[in-house]
Amino acid sequence: METAIMDQAVRAATDREGKYLTFALAGEEYGIGILKVKEIIGLMAITSVPRTPDYVKGVINLRGKVIPVADLRLKFGMESMAYTDRTCIIVVEISGAERTILMGIVVDSVSEVLNIKAADIEDTPSFGSHLNTAFILGMAKISGAVKILLDIDRIFRTEELSSMP
Amino acid sequence: MKFMNLSLTGKVIGLIILTTLIVGGAIFGSTFYFLSGEYNERAEEGIAATSGLAQANLDGLKEKLKVAAVSFSGRPDVVKAVEKKDTAYLQKIGKELTVNEGLDFMTIADQDGKVIARSHSDKTGDSVTNQINVKKALAGEASVGIEEGTVVKLSLRAGAPFKVDGRIVGTVTPGIDLTAANTFVDNIKKQFGVECTIFNQDERVSTTLEKDGKRLVGTKMDNPEVIETVLRNGKTFLNRNRIQGKDYNTAYRPIIGADGKVAGMFFVGKDRTALAKSMRGVIWAILISLLIVGFLMATAGWFLARSTVRPVFRTTDFLNRTAEEVTAAANQIAVSSQALAEGSSEQASSLEETSSSLEEMSSMTKQNAENANQAKAMMTQTRQIVEKVDSHMNQMAGAIAEITKTSEETGKIIKTIDEIAFQTNLLALNAAVEAARAGEAGAGFAVVANEVRNLALRAAEAARNTNDLIDNTIKAVKQGNELTSATREAFRENVEVAGKVAQLIDEIASASQEQAQGISQINRAVSEMDKVTQQTAANAEESASASEELTAQAEQMKASINDLAIVIGGSGQGRQPHAAGERSRGKTALRPKPSPARESRGKGRTKPALPAPKRPTPKQVIPLEDGDFKDF
């Protein structure tokens, strides 16, 4: 079993290595795997849809395609911020149960694409059993700062399956 | 005790007594004088008349004697007896005749003068030719006269011749012994009620005068004047004479003897004592009545005076009090006037000060006004400057605004560039994403994307820098603008303030104007007040002097009252002028009883018992007429 675990670990570590698109949210840097990112667009008109959760801002029309947009701040339970000219929408591909969903997430600003080595990625420390940190792939140490690498699937999958309180 | 110091009562009583005395004295004196004169005159006249009558009596007697002698000589029987020298018959007849006729003696002599018969004695044969009567009878003349004789000292003899056929045969000389048994004088006395004396020369030979019951026969006349007048000069002496210590109204007539010489004196006199007594009685009566009247009048006067004096004293008391109150009030007035005068003078001095301060204030106000005007002018200047500054500021603000606008526009452009850079960044990222998706094939593209991203970043950086610069510029400009604005605001404030100041200065100027007016008004008012104050001071002075006068008048009044009191109450009742505020209610003592009147009644009537010199002052002081007392 050790090799399985080690393989898993290596695989995990290897899985996590790659290019990440870093963005800023509420003063913190997050990262999303580049493969998950479809497109980065600037902020555009969001059509709000009724009877949707708070963090779901609405839908946008992206070259004919209607894509739901969520506010990651509200998703994370952070305070909502007024959109600036640097606010971007990152269109991500969320692999759901059956298919891949395009979703836009509103972030404060987009930074750059970083090639992060596995050595720089640390596992998420446990903050106690109370907190579910599955959606965090890991912590990346980049030039003294820590960037949180998000597992976008888990973020949106979790509440698809479970009803968010 | 001076008369003037007596009380009114005293004076009245004194006056009455004086009047009584004067009147009484006058009455008395005049009565005395006239009455006594009258009496004396009457007495003298009476005596003279009596003397005349007595003389007449004597003369009558003489005539009677003569008639008797003549008639006797005419009786033939007697003539016959004479011829016959019938002594016894003649004696008898003679005695008869003497008895009948009341003669004393009769002597019948013959034609040779030898006594044939005497009725009174038996002596015959002596010659009586020495008798004048006899002589005259022998001459044929019937006569009568007084003759001195030896036996009978003084006798009244008549002589008549006996004629037979015209031939004188004898004489008859009846006579009355004037000295014998004092019958003649007694007759006279009985008849006329006077004393009578027959003097032989100066010796009383027959008199009714008595001393110690004894007639003063043989005494001599002791009054040389009488002797001179009557015996020497043969004139009648009519006067008063003192005989034996008594006063008599006397009349001495010379007794002319048959020889024509003064043989003696025939005196009739009236004792003056009765006269004097009656005079005394009259005078006493007058005096007593006068005294009674005087006493009554004095009493009445006393009552009157008292009834007058008491109310007068009440009045004087009241007046005195009033005078004192007036004096007190006048003093108060004087004091308050004095205070008023002082206050007025103080007021005047403070008014002076006020006036001078007002002058200062006025000058200061003027200066204020001038200063205000100057300030106003300066304000206007300032305003102009400020306006200039304001316009400049405006211009500057305009320029700054321009700069700002330009900067802003530049900023906008920069912003556009930034946006472009951002978008380019996004594109680059997208390209990187696609390149990552493309995997191996997109490696080169990833580099390109990276470079593009770098360019974008550089552009963004440049834009940022420029933006920074522009921001700085804008900031600086903004600062400048702000400063300008601030300056402008300040200047505007300044203008406002200047405006306010100008307003204030205007107000100050107008206020100064009004102040100057007010000050001039105050000045006028102060000068008026000064005038009024001076007037007040003058009035206060007048008041003080008037009150002094009032005091003096009150003093005078009090002095007059005092005088009145003295007049009415005598010097003992007079009061000294009191100090203001003192009240003296000296009740005057009882008036002195009219003791002088009582005194005068007891003493001699002519002695004025009152110690009152005859001064007319009581009449002057108390204008009482004597007629006022006539009711009393």
Image (spheres, grey):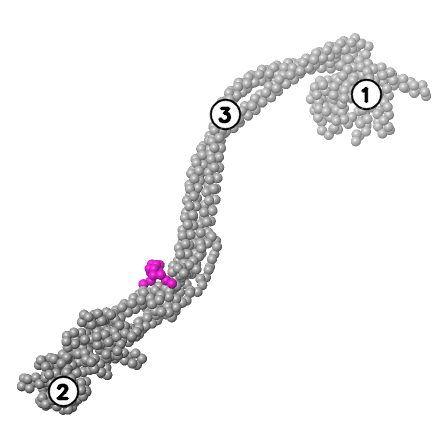
Find the magenta span and give its range: B611-625
* Residue B37, percent from left and from top: 25, 70
Report the amino acid beneath label 1: Ile
Residue in the picture at 59% in, 17% down: B401
Mark 3 — residue?
Answer: B371
Q: Position of residue B149 (x, y in %)?
A: 19, 80
Q: Quadrant of the N terminus of chain B?
A: bottom left
Badge 3 amino acid: Asn
B529 sits to left or right of B419? left
Chain letter of the residue carrying label 3: B
Q: Which residue is mark 1?
A: A148
- Asked if one can make out residue B42 in the rendered structure from this viewpoint, the answer is no
Residue kind at label 2, given as amino acid type: Ile
Q: Nearer the viewer, residue B132 or B381?
A: B132
Residue at 75% of width from left, 18% of height from top? A110
| Above or below: residue B444 compared with residue B478 | above
Instruction: Report whether A94 appears left or right of B485.
Output: right
Which residue has dot 2 on it?
B116
Q: Nearer the viewer, mark 3 or mark 1?
A: 3
* Distance between the alpha carbons at the discs numbered 2 and 1: 245 Å
SS at badge 1: strand
Res A84 → quadrant: top right
Q: CA distance from mark 2 to mark 3?
A: 179 Å
